[in-house]
Image: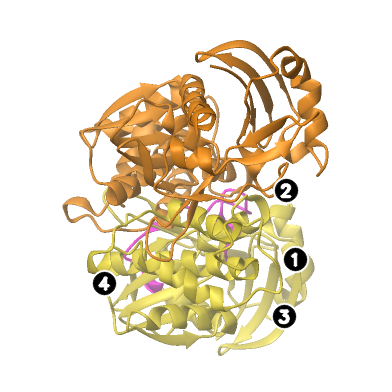
Chain colours: A yellow, B orange
Amino acid sequence: MRFIVADWGTTRFRGYLIDNEIILDQVSSDEGVSALQKGQHRDVFLHHCGRWLEAEPNAPVLLVGMVGSREGWVEAPYASCPAGPAEIAQALIPVDLTKGRKAHIIPGLFCEPAPGAADVIRGEETLVLGAGVENGLVCSAGTHPKWILVRNGRIERFATYMTGEMYALLREHSMIGRPATEPSDQKGFDMGLDAAERNGGAQGAERVGLLHLLFGARAAVVSGRMASNLLAPYLSGLLTGDEINGALAQFGRPSSVTILADQARSDLYARALARHGIGAERRNPKQALLAGLTRIVQQHAGG
Amino acid sequence: MRFIVADWGTTRFRGYLIDNEIILDQVSSDEGVSALQKGQHRDVFLHHCGRWLEAEPNAPVLLVGMVGSREGWVEAPYASCPAGPAEIAQALIPVDLTKGRKAHIIPGLFCEPAPGAADVIRGEETLVLGAGVENGLVCSAGTHPKWILVRNGRIERFATYMTGEMYALLREHSMIGRPATEPSDQKGFDMGLDAAERNGGAQGAERVGLLHLLFGARAAVVSGRMASNLLAPYLSGLLTGDEINGALAQFGRPSSVTILADQARSDLYARALARHGIGAERRNPKQALLAGLTRIVQQHAGG
């Protein structure tokens, strides 16, 4: 099936003309959601994708990502878990394009990972539905990594970690990251994983607290116990290891996790998971996005 | 005994003329260590305290705080734990003032809270030695709260948490803290303590990870589950609660903790500790500093 989609995030607009999970044509710009005011989205979309609308008068049009957030085109309320392609297709939010043509915004998902707790996802749900996982645990690793439990092809529940944003905060704004020097020595990543183990509670280890282990990184450098070029990868390893500790506590210990990330990041997660005796299946995020969109648009067209 | 001291931190210079734990005269300025270049410290000290040097030709002179760090006057190497007034007095580092007169920098302390881990303290050790605790657990709460175990009047070991700095990072620079609105509702602090319990590992609770609970705060606000004026105190409660979980894991669960902090912060710690059935003894930080300095200067004079 041929369709038009905009993957419209906080910082980037990416338009695709897709057929059979293949990109026929594409366009991108820096007109992300954060760069736009209310009322501008329609014109931006028509400017980039109007020629496809004319050439493909019957193609469905989907919008995915932060375009459905409060700061986006219109707010698409979060749908509830469990949710698969059918539930998401039913919760699509229409917006007017031109001459009666509509686009449909894919809603984010809400879940309660624990009683009274809240978590949300907006965009990654579509990748996960295209990752080819019928039953299993998926990690979509980015600024805010998501761990998503899939049951019978539907997203059962998920938990988000602020790992990537935290790393950036520590490097750019904190006293903790200030002594870091370049080029960084990747050995530090494994040392950070070692430290995360001390916060894992396993094998009688005391749960000393992430806020203490973070300060300890600075203390190790200023007291001369750690070379300053180990600090940045150490922080990355510590944060990643603590994320994985928490995710495994919430979702159990599968024999393998499916990782949606670029090659370098996938390698780090695979390395960290191997310490727990857990394998890593890698999926290309863009291919997963195309496959997930195709599943949703098929449900939408057939529903 | 009469003596002169500079409590010389990152952002402030504070000079005192002290006799019998009473401040006879004082001066302060914003010439903290971070505002000065190498070679400027002597002149700054003489400018502010020179009149006391002349009036009190036999008074010992102590310098405490970041003035002994790498960025300070001269670097005073960390002394090892356990350390009490005697060990610290022996490790004082002299610097030249004028006409043969010397000041002595109080060194920081280093400890290994766990094998291979590192922690450092510079300044708070003096407060702790003046807190009137012979055996017990002390919390010096500030930007980087320190939990210090005292045995037989000496600092046995300690652990630092980056709680205060983390709160500032989240409020000022992160997506997590962005939705927070004023005036904040202090009810959120208790909700944050609730969330920290879910990371405590007690009573079968899964250890879900601080990085997840932090993101959950944002998720709760953007999904409409939490009012945005609860967010800031919620983050404060979550971070404080997680710090206390970690400190109690490292140092056991005493019946009471001695807290060195201003009134408002002491109240928050007392509230959080009460959930664990632990009492709080409050000490005024400035009185503790004077008492700790007096103990060190007496050792120095007598040694």
Q: Magenta part of the protein: which range?
A: A64-89
The furthest residue to the left:
B203
Q: Residue at x 59, y 49 (%)?
A: B174
The answer to whether mark 3 and mark 2 are in CB contact below 8 A is: no
Mark 1 — residue? A46
Tell me: residue B256, above or below residue A12: above
Give the label, 1 or 2, closer to the camera.
2
Chain containing the residue with disc 1: A
Mark 3 — residue? A26
Both marks 3 and 1 on one chain: yes
The amino acid type of the residue labelled 3 equals Gln
Q: Residues within 10 Å of mark 3 (few under 14, many from 20)?
A: some
Both marks 1 and 2 on one chain: yes
| In front of the other: A16 or A266 | A266
Q: In the shown orientation, is residue A27 left or right of residue B250? A: right
Q: CA distance from mark 4 to mark 3?
A: 40 Å
Q: CA distance from mark 3 to mark 2?
A: 24 Å
Q: Residues within 10 Å of mark 1 (few under 14, many from 20)?
A: some
Q: Quadrant of the C terminus of chain A?
A: bottom left
Q: CA distance from mark 1 to mark 2?
A: 16 Å
> Residue A37's mark?
2
Q: Residue at x 64, y 42 (%)?
A: B68
The amino acid type of the residue labelled 1 equals Leu
Q: How far across and how far down the image is residue A296, in percent?
A: 47, 75
Disc 4 secondary structure class: loop
Disc 3 secondary structure class: strand
Both marks 3 and 2 on one chain: yes
Q: In the shown orientation, is residue A223 left or right of residue B70? A: left
Q: How far across and how far down the image is residue A289, in percent?
A: 54, 78
Mark 4 — residue? A252
Q: CA distance from mark 4 to mark 2?
A: 43 Å
Q: Residues within 10 Å of mark 2 (few under 14, many from 20)?
A: few
